[in-house]
Amino acid sequence: MDEINIITTCFSIVYGLIILSGIQYLLFKNIYRSVNKTFLFYVLLSIVYYFLNLLVVPDFYGFTGGFKVGTDDLKYFTQIKDESVLLKNTLSYGVLSHTHQFSIFLKILYPFPIYSPLQIITFNCLGITLIPILGKRIFDIYFTDEFYRTKILFILLLLCPTLLMNGLILIRDGWTTQFFMIFCYLLLTKRYNFLMFLSAGLLIFLRPSFIVFPFLFAFIELNFHKKFFWSRSIALLLILLPIAAIFLKQIEGVDLSEGVTRDGYVDSFLGKFEDESIFYKIMKLPFPLNILVSYIFFLTSPFLKFRFFYEDTFIIRNVFSILEAVMMIILMPVFFKNLKSNVSNLSFQKLLTFVSVSILVLSTISLQFRHKIILLPFIYMLLVFSFKKSSLNFILITIYLLLQLMIVL
């Protein structure tokens, strides 16, 4: 790294801490040292990830790589970098057809010339920094007097492989999750203020198809305890489905006229991964079997994937996926084991309803597992609350592991 890159990166870190302090004060009326430490921890990890990418895919300037190896982070960088920064052969990596809303968002939040990838990558860690503490606070609202589990949840969210995989690089998934959690936290604390609506608005701006999640969470939270909740829900669904279909078609290009399984998208995008995509094979099952199986698969994903190379290039992102799969193997069987006893808890019921419906929605409007990140903190809340010590846990975990191995091998 040359001197200017070091200086601009240090500036980004300091600027990120200033922005973070302001957001903390607006949310919590306080500035916590632990949250600032979380940001610096993520910054350190992002720097390590950057140099690993330079080592593994040197032609991508510290970004994650191309087809089947990385994601769109380099494409975003080409839109926000200073004009004096020249990148060779960017056309071979693919370009975005228009100025992306995430690029616009970053240019507004970071209104300074961007000279190096690390300068904006470190700042972008701001997009996941509040997720652990927000998850902890939301969990504490739902499940009071659960100090030990609250602490465990914070650690799991802090080190969540999926959050790290998508939050330490220059993509929008961490930001959308964080804005959604800010919205949920303010709603739960009955602070119906400008910040709550701003966070929902920014979520929708960054990913318009996710407009459904703030409305769904608010509807369940404000109506779950009322009579005739399910009949109201069905009536609302019948009203919103046609509106959602029009909205998704116009804004996101999601054509539900293809059917809820979106056959065109399955063939055009997932078909590229036909030989290695379990999800592609599931979606090609007869309807409605594909919906049922994809729902279960989406809920329990990611599965173990022992593919670490594509054309002799090491896929770093698959390491994160393996770690996330291991966490799910440990937590998911115990969740199902204790499900019957936990549903008597009203807060658990509300969270379970939100997560269950949201996964069904997400599996329709997205079909990409990394978009599940927006629900992951809430899934973790259910899993952590469900985890209880038992002699059966090891047996259940072993059985679940064997089932996964049977599927992927």
Image: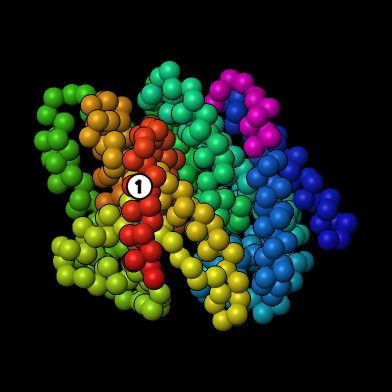
User: Relative to 217, is 291 above or below?
Assistant: below
Q: Residue at x 18, y 24 (%)?
A: 226
Mark 1 lies on residue: 395
Q: Residue at x 36, y 37 (%)?
A: 391
User: Relative to 261, is 33 above or below?
Assistant: above
Q: Is residue 308 visible?
A: yes
Q: Main secondary structure of the magenta part?
A: helix
Q: Position of residue 110 (x, y in %)?
A: 66, 47
Q: Position of residue 382 (x, y in %)?
A: 36, 36
Q: Residue at x 34, y 66 (%)?
A: 406
Q: Which corner quadrant holds the C terminus?
A: bottom left
Q: Position of residue 240 (x, y in %)?
A: 21, 46
Q: The magenta stretch spans which residues?
A: 27-38
User: Relative to 68, is 344 above or below?
Assistant: above
Q: Which corner quadrant holds the N terminus?
A: bottom right
> What is the count of numbered marks?
1
Question: Is 235 on the left or on the right of 135, as rendered?
Answer: left
Residue closer to the observer: 231 or 156 = 156
User: In the figure, residue 33 lies in which quadrant?
Assistant: top right
Q: Is residue 324 magenta?
A: no
User: In the figure, residue 218 lies in which quadrant?
Assistant: top left
Please, which residue is most extreme toward the top here? 145
Label 1 residue SS = helix
User: Relative to 90, is 168 above or below?
Assistant: above
Residue closer to the observer: 394 or 164 = 394
Q: Position of residue 336 (x, y in %)?
A: 29, 42
Q: Amino acid at mark 1?
A: Ile
Q: Is residue 110 visible?
A: no
Question: Is 137 on the left or on the right of 109, as rendered?
Answer: left
User: In the figure, residue 104 lies in which quadrant?
Assistant: bottom right
